[in-house]
Amino acid sequence: QVQLIESGGGLVQAGGSLRLSCAASGRTFSRYFMGWFRQAPGKEREFVAGMPWSGSSTYYADSVKGRFTISRDNAKNTVYLQMNSLKPEDTAVYYCAARLNSQRQYDYWGQGTQVTVSS
């Protein structure tokens, strides 16, 4: 059974930092692309950052470039999202997701973790 479990969300003041973690289990993810998404109240879910499990390329939404960094620890089967210089508009539920490199649709999703940035 595949599981993606996010953690690390919380309340932080504007300008602060948080690191989200996504612990992946239940299969080998070497052929998967890992993504972070977020959904704010009343808004559609949007892509934030992503990277292939095997490889070093990284991808970011324009709104987070230069502030957020995605990384992974293969030994721990965990993907991270380091978020710096947080803004109130970053407030959202953040989700980890996985899809095959050859697909566009994400097959697996975590339950989400709330990030709230106060002004």
Image: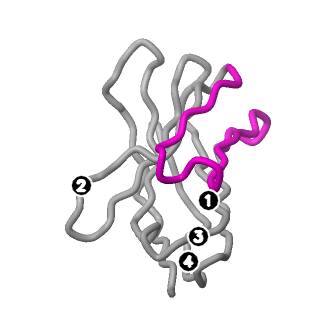
Quarter of the rendering occupied by the N terminus: top left
- Residues in magenta, as a range: 55-78
User: What's the CA distance linking mark 1 and mark 3?
Assistant: 13 Å
Element type at marker 3? loop
The residue singled out by tag 2 in the image is 44
The answer to which of marks 3 and 4 sits earlier in the sequence is 4
The residue singled out by tag 4 in the image is 10
Left/right of residue 85 with respect to residue 100 in the rendered view: right
Instruction: Tell me, for residue 11, which label it has, or none.
Output: none
In the image, what residue type sits under mark 3? Leu
Q: Badges 3 and 2: C-beta atoms under 8 Å apart?
A: no
In the image, what residue type sits under mark 2? Glu
In the image, what residue type sits under mark 4? Gly
Element type at marker 2? loop
Q: Relative to the observer, which residue lies in front, 115 or 16?
A: 16
The residue singled out by tag 1 in the image is 20
